[in-house]
Image (spheres, grey):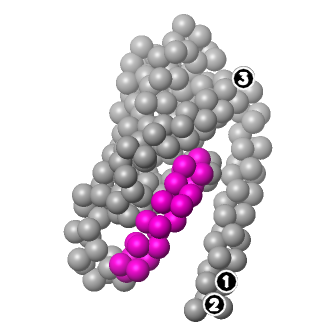
Amino acid sequence: MEELIQIIQANIQYAPFIIFGTLLLAGLNIPVSEDAMLFIAAILASNHPEYLVQLFFGVYLGAYFSDLICYGLGRKVGPKLLKIKFFASMAPPERVAKISAYYQKYGMITLIIGRFIPFGVRNALFLTAGLGKMNFTKFALSDWLACTISSVSFFSLYYYYGETVIDYIKQGNMVIFSLVLILLGVFWYKNKRTA
């Protein structure tokens, strides 16, 4: 990551555009770490304060539009994928209906909590929102709020504390991911018992 930061620092005037474009690739489910882009943008901003606003908006808008792309993929391409037996077995119509009902009931909270969960959970969340046909306006507004909260939080932490905060955030992400897995397990168990 240090080498990437050095390359971008040598071309700092293009950094916001590079970060924005790289994050758009994440919306296509190409494995690009939003957390890494936030970290890189914040570190660059701390070294080049004259680019603070451009770097923040490059990473913020890149993350937001990436989410919208991912939602769109789920909405437009998702149903076609579900016609393929392999994908259909992973997401049967009953499961998609259940996800859709979950978004209708807990929509904004789901997205806000989901934005803080790493390991591809974010993209899965956005894809299933599209696949479950969550209302686009509701998704866009909910995700805008969620993206604002997470981007401002992480960018500020990285900007002010740099690399010293990374280990704490990794541990926090692991705790959140573990809690979500436990909660999903409890819900699954309860649903299995009642069925």
Question: How far apart, in angstroms, are the residues tagged by discs 1 and 2?
Answer: 6 Å
| Magenta stretch: includes residue 136 | no
Tag 3 residue: 160
Tag 2 residue: 194
Dot 3 falls on a residue whose secondary structure is helix
Horizontal placement of 15 versus 181: left or right?
Answer: left
Q: Main secondary structure of the magenta part?
A: helix
On the image, the x and y values in percent for residue 52 come to: 55, 15
**For the residue marked with disc 1, what is the amino acid?**
Lys
Q: State yes or no: discs 1 and 2 in contact (Cβ < 8 Å).
A: yes
* Quarter of the image that includes the N terminus: top right
* Quarter of the image that includes the C terminus: bottom right
On the image, the x and y values in percent for residue 177 come to: 67, 60
- Which label sits in the foreground, 2 or 3? 2
Q: Residue at x 55, y 33 (%)?
A: 148
Tag 1 residue: 190
Q: Residue at x 38, y 38 (%)?
A: 65
Badge 2 local density, few (<14 within 10 Å), some, or many (20+)?
Answer: few
Question: How far apart, in angstroms, are the residues tagged by discs 3 and 1?
Answer: 43 Å
Name above or below for residue 100 compared with residue 39. below
Horizontal placement of 180 versus 125: left or right?
Answer: right
Span highlighted in magenta in the image? 90-112
Considering depth in this image, is 144 or 86 the residue closer to the camera? 144
